[in-house]
Each structure stands twice: as C-alpha cells, then as structure tokens.
Image: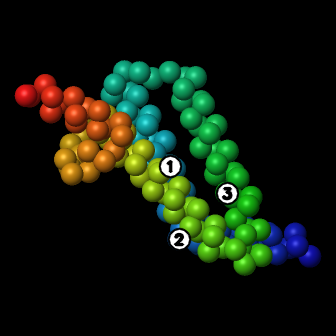
Amino acid sequence: MLHIEYIKHLSALIDNPVFFAFFLAVLIDVMTGFVKSLVNKKTTSSKGIGGLIKHSTLLLIVCMLYPFCDIYGASGMADTLLIFYILFYGISIIENLGQMGIPIPTWLKKYIYKLSDEYNKGDSDEK
C-alpha cells in the first residue's frame, strides 16, 4: 500500500518547516527577480517564463521525491538537500536586492559573486 503511504506523506509535506522555508525561498526569489527586472527595465517574457519553468520544475520534483525519502527513512538527507537549496536561493535573493539598488552590507557584498564585481569595480574607480 505504498500509494496510501505516499499520499499521507505528501499531504504532510506542507507541515515540514524545511520544505515550507524552501517554498518561501523559491517564491521570494521569483518575486525579487521579477521586481529587479522591472527596476532595471530588462523585463523579457522569454527569460521570465524560462525562470518560472525552472523553479516550478524544481518544486514539482521536490514535491514528488520528498515523500519517498520520508517513507524510506531518508528525510534527513532530503532536508539537508533542501537546506542547500534554501542557501542558494538566499544568495539569489540578496543578488536581486543588490542589483535593485537596495543597500547590502559591505561584509556580505564582497562574498556575493554578482555583487562583488560591482564592489571591486567601485573600489578601483575610487583609487
């Protein structure tokens, strides 16, 4: 009766705080990416649709595979993978905010790749 177990674990997925944080990170990244494109006047439908497809596919894969991991006792490994995704999405959110012109702390800015180019270029222009 794997299908019944699967459905129980799938319905319980929303109560998982790691999955919920992952879902929020994806949602915030999509929203900040869209706002960034509006602020920078670089909104293109092809890039937006491509991003939505990528993020939706990742969410769908996680929603399909996580219940199996949970059933077979590997939810800890799945949570670890989701935490890494949350960190990557967090970096993307910070990049989006920085590219919109929202101030990012200098100590953090130099560790974020897309912002470090601006940071290093800004330092060399001042010298």
Q: Which residue shows up at 77% across the image and 75% down it?
A: 71
What is the CA distance from the residue labelled 3 to the residue labelled 1? 14 Å
Report whether residue 24 is seen.
Answer: no
Q: x, y (%) of residue 40?
A: 34, 25
Q: Is residue 35 left or right of residue 72?
A: left
Mark 3 / mark 1, whichever is N-terminal: 1
Name which residue type carries label 1: Leu
Question: Where is residue 34, by image quadrant?
Answer: top left
Which residue is disc 3 drawn over? 62
Is disc 2 surrounded by few (<14), some (14 to 19) or many (20+) residues within 10 Å?
A: few
Q: Which residue shows up at 54% across the image and 26% down it?
A: 47
Q: x, y (%) of residue 93?
A: 39, 46
- State the mark number for residue 27: 1
Q: Residue furthest right?
A: 1
Query: Which quadrant: the C terminus?
Result: top left
Q: x, y (%) of residue 61?
A: 70, 53
Foreground pick, 51 / 83 = 83
Query: Which quadrant: the N terminus?
Result: bottom right
Q: x, y (%) of residue 15?
A: 59, 72
Question: Where is residue 18, by image quadrant?
Answer: bottom right
Is disc 3 surrounded by few (<14), some (14 to 19) or many (20+) residues within 10 Å?
A: some
Which residue is disc 2 drawn over? 17
Q: Is residue 50 left or right of residue 29?
A: right
Q: Secondary structure at mark 2?
A: helix
Q: Is residue 119 left or right of residue 61?
A: left
